[in-house]
Image: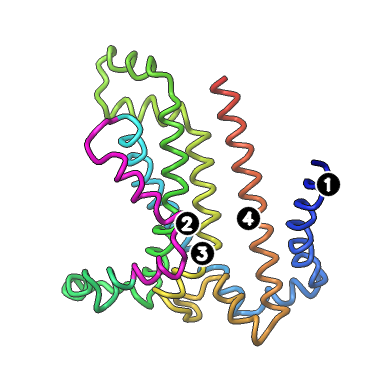
Amino acid sequence: MWAALTVSFAFVTIPIVAILTANSPAALLDQLSDPAAVDALLLSLECSVIALLIVVGFGTPTAWLLATRKFRGRSLATTIIELPLVLPPAVAGLGLLAAFGPLGWLGGAEETLGIRLALETAGVVVALVFVSAPFHIRQAQAAFEGMHPGLRDAARTMGMNDAAVFIKVAVPTVAPALAAGATLAWARALGEFGATLMFAGSLRGVTQTAPLAIYEGFGSNLAGAQALAAVLVAASAALLVTTRLLTRRWEIAGA
């Protein structure tokens, strides 16, 4: 067992350390000062934050409904909402293009309303929401299902309606778990590549996020690509540690 753990740890650790040590600190800062790298990082941050706000705003009440209501088609709805977790990124991007592209199902309606998503920054946000939402909804649903039923019953006896129970009781009670789910969703959005490329393209300053800039730099500026990769590794590690701490806090509070 210790041998298996050692091999597993080394297999994951070596590539990560190789990325972080590919450039010296001075070279790393020099590469990250490149305008293309700055544009990609800022666009990733902007689009992922907007996507996170949308995911939390719509995903949290969705998770509450799925966790507290029994209705026909509930299992099907849960399965469909979680489907992006296992979809190949290229399939996700193609699906978004078929639905929201200029020739897609809703392309005519978007044109009438003056909305453009494909090859636009807004399209990046749509792609990030699509792939990251299940991470938050799944965590939030599990947290709401784990609440003691007596809390909801007690709130209702005090005259609270369902909306008040959700806002004043449920959300504060499982706040650490909700934050953990949001952090996971944010990490997924920061690392998204395939769906964004298929649906929004890779236009510098418009749709080229950090992962797309890494892909482009792989053939022309390897050092720059490695520098961006190091930033994403550090960001992902920080978000993962935050998720673990928040989950631990929730578990302690529940105990």
Name the secondary structure under disc 1: helix
Q: Identify the residue under disc 4.
A: 236
Q: Nearer the viewer, residue 139 or 117?
A: 139
Report x, y in % for residue 96: 34, 68
Q: Nearer the viewer, residue 216 or 10?
A: 10
Report x, y in % for residue 57: 36, 46
Question: Which residue: 17% across, 70% down?
Answer: 109
Mark 4 is on which residue type? Ser
- Specify which label sits upstream in the sequence, 3 or 4: 3
Q: Identify the residue under disc 2.
A: 49
Of tags 3 and 1, the one toward the viewer is: 1
Name the secondary structure under disc 2: helix
Q: Decide: is 58 above or below 111.
A: above
- Specify which label sits upstream in the sequence, 3 or 2: 2
Q: Identify the residue under disc 1.
A: 3
Question: Which residue: 41% across, 64% down?
Answer: 125
Of tags 4 and 2, the one toward the viewer is: 4
Q: Which residues are magenta?
A: 69-96
- Specify which label sits upstream in the sequence, 4 or 2: 2
State yes or no: discs 4 and 2 in contact (Cβ < 8 Å).
no
- Specify which label sits upstream in the sequence, 1 or 4: 1
| Cα separation between marks 2 and 1 | 41 Å
Question: Which residue: 83% across, 71% down?
Answer: 24
Report x, y in % for residue 216: 58, 81
The crowding category of the residue bearing disc 4, from other C-alpha atoms within 10 Å (few below 14, some 14 to 19, many at least 20), is some
Of tags 3 and 2, the one toward the viewer is: 3
